[in-house]
Amino acid sequence: MQVYSGSSNPALAKKLASKLRVRLGKIEVSRFANDEGRVFVTEPKVDSKVIVVQSLSIPTDTHLVEFCLICDALRRKGAKQIIAVIPWLGYSKQDKVFREGEALSIKVVAKILELNFLDKIYVLNLHSQLIKKSFRRPIIELTARPLIEDYFKNKVTRDHVVVAPDKGSVASCRQLAKDLGVPLVKITKKRDRKTGIIAVTGMTGEVKGKRVIIKDDMIATGSTMIEVSKFLKAKGAKSIEVGAVHHLYVPGTQSRLNRDGIDQLVVTDTVAAPAGTRGIKVLSVAGILAKAIRA
């Protein structure tokens, strides 16, 4: 078995190969002058069973096509089984038709991925369970939440509280608060459907003088975290730490998070941090993936 990496997350692919104690296959990914993708497998001998690691992160469409080209190139060099490791499944927020006339984007992407005749697909922390219905065969969803939770367990104090930033995060935040032995505070908010602007309307519980832990699965634009953090700081929170599995590194988001009240951001490497990113603690999902693949 060998591990091959696209250009989205080579560091994670290297860690996964190390955990599995297998070879990281040699591959060249480049672009033609007209911006079309080009893949060249330079590994002398491709094993019959291979793993391809590629997050569908920014630039999403480029990484999707690149993944397909890698799979085709590996098949042509002798791979019989291809295991896809897609730590962040791009287009997963488009899991339903929100307005008449829109594409059901995740279903389209699922069809594209399945054209590669994949043996298995591993993903981490899907945006919703509706996504699985878009695939004709089961995909294996793993969770990196324990990484985030263990990080906070090792530093929690009596001054901490857990804050659920929206209705969808209440259940997991309640469990985290229980595990940490600290109170749960729930935020209520509303989002303007047309503008996307988020407004915090209230909260249950007390944060004055407290060290706040906010947990969510994903940071895209960071608008929810920023508005919630501003609200909590105005209510007297001493510090704010945020834990999220996926950080999509939408341009400008990290600088806003650094500026607007968040003292510590803890994420995983499902998406590679751009060079020069500061203000974050990155935990690796390589061990979680390796354990599942070995099982």
Image: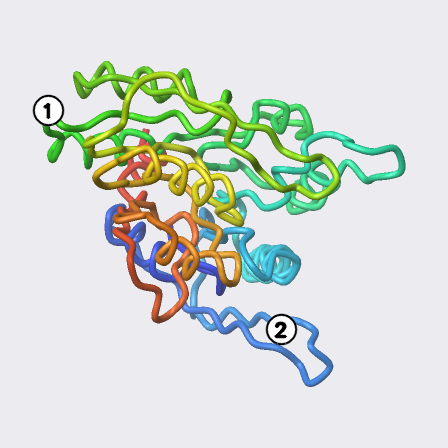
Nearest to viewer (mark 1 / mark 2)? 1
- Category of crowding for the residue at label 2, using alpha-carbon neighbours closer than 10 angstroms: few (below 14), some (14–19), many (at least 20): some
Q: Name the outermost residue toward the right.
A: 101
Residue 137 falls left or right of residue 22: right
> Is 107 situated left or right of 232 in this image?
right
Is 117 on the left-hand or right-hand side of 208?
right
| Protein image colouring | rainbow
Residue 151, picture quadrant: top left
Q: Quadrant of residue 114?
A: top right
Image quadrant where residue 77 sits: bottom right
Q: Of helix, strand and loop, which one carries label 1? A: loop
Three-letter code, disc 1: Arg
Q: Is residue 57 above or below residue 238?
A: below
Q: Residue 267 or 123: which is nearer the viewer?
A: 267
Q: Is residue 86 visible?
A: no
Q: Nearer the viewer, residue 180 or 286?
A: 180
Question: Which residue in the protein does label 2 denote?
Answer: 38
Query: What residue lies at 23% left-to-right and 41% top-to-bottom?
Result: 239
Q: Residue furthest bottom?
A: 33
- Mark 1 crowdedness (10 Å alpha carbons): few <14, some 14-19, many ≥20: few
In the displayed structure, 138 sits above or below 286; it is above
Tell how many labels: 2
Distance from Cα at disc 1 to Cα at disc 2: 55 Å
Query: What type is the residue that disc 2 sits on?
Result: Arg
Residue 158 numbered tag: 1
- Which residue is at 40% across, 42% downward? 230
Residue 293 horizontal/vertical position (percent): 36, 36
Mark 1 near mark 2, Cβ–Cβ under 8 Å? no
